[in-house]
Amino acid sequence: MKLREGRYRVISLGTGRDRKNFMATAANLDFKNESDLVFSDISSEAWREYQFESGATVKIDNPVKLNVSESGGHRIFDGQGLSHYIPKGWIHLVWEPKPGQPNFVR
């Protein structure tokens, strides 16, 4: 089986020996923003990781859109179609650009 270029997600169904993995494309996951929030394109990033003073980290693969709220929180939409909210309070943010992409876009 040949996969087309794009974003993919593995979906597991069942339990134990009966578990089956399916590959699903994220191509039909559209970003829908029905708020008055403005989102920036950060799809040039391969991943980003937030580090907190407690030592906790939050890593987001394939971030696509970013909104920075007035309070400093980050709303992120990722390549799997998931929405994340990272509250203000992180002490370090690190990311890796995709090959050939700029290090800074915003």
Image: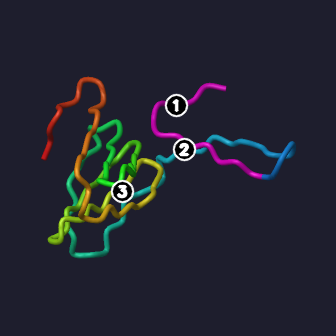
**Residue 31 drawn above or below residue 7:** below
Would residue 16 appear left or right of 67 to someone viewing this image? right
Q: From this viewpoint, which residue is outermost toward the right? A: 17
Kindly report the distance in space between the C-alpha atoms of the residues bearing marks 1 and 3. 22 Å
Quarter location, residue 22: top right
Which portion, as a residue range, is magenta? 1-13
The three-letter code of the residue at mark 2 reads Thr
Eye-nearest disc, 3 or 2? 3
Q: Which residue is mark 3?
A: 77
Q: Secondary structure at mark 3?
A: strand
Query: Taking 7 as reference, is 1 above or below it?
Result: above
Which amino acid is tagged 1?
Arg
Disc 1 from disc 2: Cα separation: 9 Å
Residue 4: which disc? Answer: 1
Query: If you read the primary sequence from the N terminus, does the residue marked by circle 3 or circle 2 appear first?
Result: 2
Secondary structure under the numbered disc 2 in the rendered image: strand
Give the spatial CA distance, label 3 vs label 2. 16 Å
Where residue 2 sits: x, y (%)? 61, 25
Q: Which residue is mark 2?
A: 25
Whether residues under marks 3 and 2 lie with C-beta atoms below 8 angstroms apart, the answer is no
Q: Measured from the top left, where is residue 33 in percent x and y?
A: 31, 68
